[in-house]
């Protein structure tokens, strides 16, 4: 393999390993070192990013949050400032998380499994 071909292959592998998905207001990036970065879409300063050890670490954070949560709930985990709102919004935008943004002020997310269960309980109560 020529040096030029090897360099091209290395670039292709790097691009495949570091995948960035952009959503409406946030973006998520899987880095080569295994970390996962949540950022504001189109932002280029470190003040607009939150680095997690892995995507699984972000998943564990989501799982620990209550069925309805706000930026205040996220701040209890040590995420501060505008990053906490960015992470809440990322949960609402990323398809891997079963939740929806319910309100913008205060920014509130409801896990859809919880919303579905509540709707089912309400339907059962009215049926009796």
Image (tube, grey):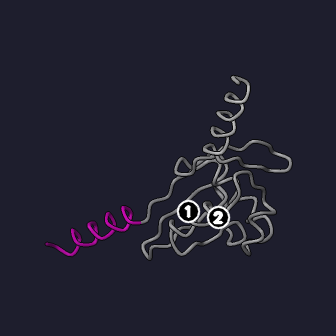
Residue at image mark 2: 64
Residue at image mark 1: 59
Q: Position of residue 69 (x, y in %)?
A: 75, 55
Label 2 vs 1, first from the N-terminus:
1
Using the numbered discs, state the Cα–Cα distance from disc 2 to disc 1 in whole angstroms.
9 Å
Q: Residue at x 21, y 68 (%)?
A: 5
- Residue most extreme to the top: 127
Q: Position of residue 53 (x, y in %)?
A: 54, 75
Per the image, is 73 magenta? no
Residue 119, image quadrant = top right
Name the mark nearer the viewer: 2 or 1. 2
Q: Magenta-highlighted stretch: main secondary structure?
A: helix
Left or right, 30 with reference to 5: right
Q: Residues within 10 Å of mark 1 (few under 14, many from 20)?
A: few
User: Which structural element holds mark 1?
Assistant: helix
Look at the image and give the residue range highlighted in magenta: 1-17
- Quadrant in which the N terminus appears: bottom left
- Residue most extreme to the front: 128
């Amino acid at each position: 393999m020529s040096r030029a071909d090897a360099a091209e292959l290395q670039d292709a592998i790097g691009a495949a390993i570091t995948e960035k998905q952009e959503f409406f207001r946030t973006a998520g990036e899987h880095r080569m070192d295994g970390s996962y970065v949540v950022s504001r879409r189109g932002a280029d300063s470190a003040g607009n990013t939150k680095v997690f050890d892995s995507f699984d670490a972000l998943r564990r954070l989501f799982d620990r949050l209550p069925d309805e949560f706000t930026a205040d709930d996220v701040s209890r985990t040590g995420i501060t400032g505008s990053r906490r709102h960015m992470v809440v919004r990322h949960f609402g935008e990323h398809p891997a998380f079963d939740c929806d943004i319910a309100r913008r002020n205060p920014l509130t997310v409801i896990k859809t499994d919880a919303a579905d269960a509540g709707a089912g309980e309400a339907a059962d109560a009215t049926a009796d």
